[in-house]
Image (cartoon, rainbow, N blue to C red):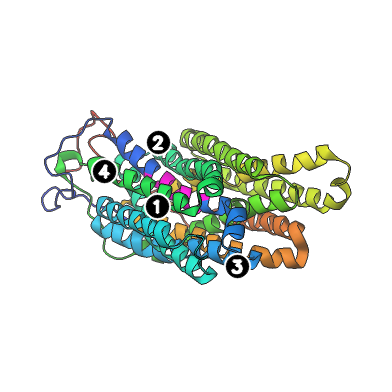
Amino acid sequence: MSAIVTRTDCQSTPRAEGSGSRTFTPNHRWKVLGIGVAANAGFSATFSGIPATAVLMRQGYHLGNAQLGLALGLLGLGVALSELPWGLLTDRWGDRRVLLTGLGATAAWLFLMALLVVPSPSGVPGVHVLAAALLATGLLGGSVNGSSGRAIMGWFREGERGFAMSIRQTAVPLGGGLGALVLPLLAATHGFAAVYGLLAAFSVISAIFAWRWLHEPPTQGSAAPTVLAGPRPLRNVEVWRIAAAIGLLCFPQVAVLTFASVFLHDFAGMGTLATSASLAAVQAGAMAMRVWSGRFTDRHGNRRPFLRLCSALSALAFTLLWLLVLAGPTISGGQPVAMATLPVLLIVAGILVSAWHGVAYTELATLAGAGHVGTALSLANSFVFIGFFLVPVAIPGLLHLWSWPGVWLSAAACALIAWPIFLRPASVSVPKPPHFATTSLSRPGKPDRSC
């Protein structure tokens, strides 16, 4: 594996796009982080909130479980297909241009869906229309992840990046939790036009924040890091390993996000309010764990061991859920305490399998190097959203063959398989983390010695 080097040349390197003669306060990096959180929360409310309406979507669009899984899966497939192209564009054009383009296009498309792709007294859109619309939503929304991650890695220094990236990753459960609480009730009372319209408004607000405050970070001496030519992360075996492990560990998380509401409704007999509250609890717990894990691993330098621990605990939690569901026929009749344990255990499993994101993305970005953060993060997100496509499509088949025990046992298996991938290969000499350019804001008071 070749080391990736970032060079700073004060004589020939152009100024960072967007920095020009601008001056920023030392706290501006927190505004950049806030933009990343807002943008990711808005899109998370889309790709996690829409599946939370699964029961109502199944009724309103007249879908079977297989058709529902296809429609929800294509939302994830759209993101998976577009993540890497958006990431390559981010490293070439800068995060500001890509984020503004993606957010604006996503907002316009969701407004169009609110007008044309909703059940009404005059007719119900077919499954192919709904699936194609959700696929396009994913294709446009894939711009958010890599571009916002690149901005944060540029504005924060080593020792802060794990914490900052983990805060950004809280946007996923934050948006998903708000979506799980609000969107099902909104769909039940005002229909899916209100759902898509609200999601479009989130994208518009995020775009306004990005237009106002998101710029490339200024470097010491007005020098910007030179971006190396070529998609080097795509030739880095270790980057591929971590990206694949991230995607694999997301499979059980996607199972919770997309079909937990159906599981709690069909198997445990819970209503819309209770299922929404359970999914919101998963997202709230994941937010708290992501912030804590980022700070913890920044202080102890133990990202890989922490990722392995999350994999092992997730596998254990889903195994316990599998065993409890296996006993379902014997407990559903006369043991309400045992049935009440089901949503609690599902919440615990969902939190454990969602706690590691900021740590994993920081490790991946550090491996890739400063000039390739957008590409590396988008590679990982491609694997993640392949899961958002495959898991909803696979779950109806698992339900047909082995019912809910098969679903949760498969989730446990995915988490267990991810565990050894997070180990550093003993036969590979891993270089020191590649250099990220130091901005004049991320380390105030330090003189520039690069020239």
Q: Which residue is mark 1?
A: 145
Identity of the residue drawn at 49% across and 53% down? 192
Q: Nearer the viewer, residue 3 or 398?
A: 398
Disc 1 packing (10 Å; few <14; some 14–19; many ≥20): many
Does the CB distance between marks 3 and 1 fall below 8 Å?
Answer: no
Disc 3 packing (10 Å; few <14; some 14–19; many ≥20): some
Tell me which label, 3 or 4, sits earlier in the chain.
Answer: 3
Q: Which residue is mark 3?
A: 67
Per the image, label 2 sits on a secondary structure element best described as loop
Does the CB distance between marks 3 and 4 fall below 8 Å?
Answer: no
Disc 2 packing (10 Å; few <14; some 14–19; many ≥20): some
Does the CB distance between marks 1 and 2 fall below 8 Å?
Answer: no
Observer-side mark, 3 or 4, equals 3
Residue 259 horizontal/vertical position (percent) = 63, 55
Measured in 3D between alpha carbons, the distance from the residue under mark 1 to the one under mark 2, in whole angstroms, is 22 Å
At label 2, which amino acid type do we have? Gly
> Which range is magenta?
39-49
Tell me which label, 3 or 1, sits earlier in the chain.
Answer: 3
Residue 437 horizontal/vertical position (percent) = 27, 45
Disc 4 packing (10 Å; few <14; some 14–19; many ≥20): many
Observer-side mark, 2 or 4, equals 4
Could you tell me which quadrant the N terminus lies in?
bottom left
Measured in 3D between alpha carbons, the distance from the residue under mark 2 to the one under mark 3, in whole angstroms, is 46 Å
Tell me which label, 1 or 4, sits earlier in the chain.
Answer: 1
Residue 106 horizontal/vertical position (percent) = 36, 56
Q: Is residue 180 magenta?
A: no
Tell me which label, 1 or 2, sits earlier in the chain.
Answer: 1
Q: Which residue is mark 4?
A: 214
Q: Is residue 44 magenta?
A: yes
Q: Which residue is mark 2?
A: 159
Q: Is residue 111 above or below residue 30?
A: below
Per the image, label 1 sits on a secondary structure element best described as helix
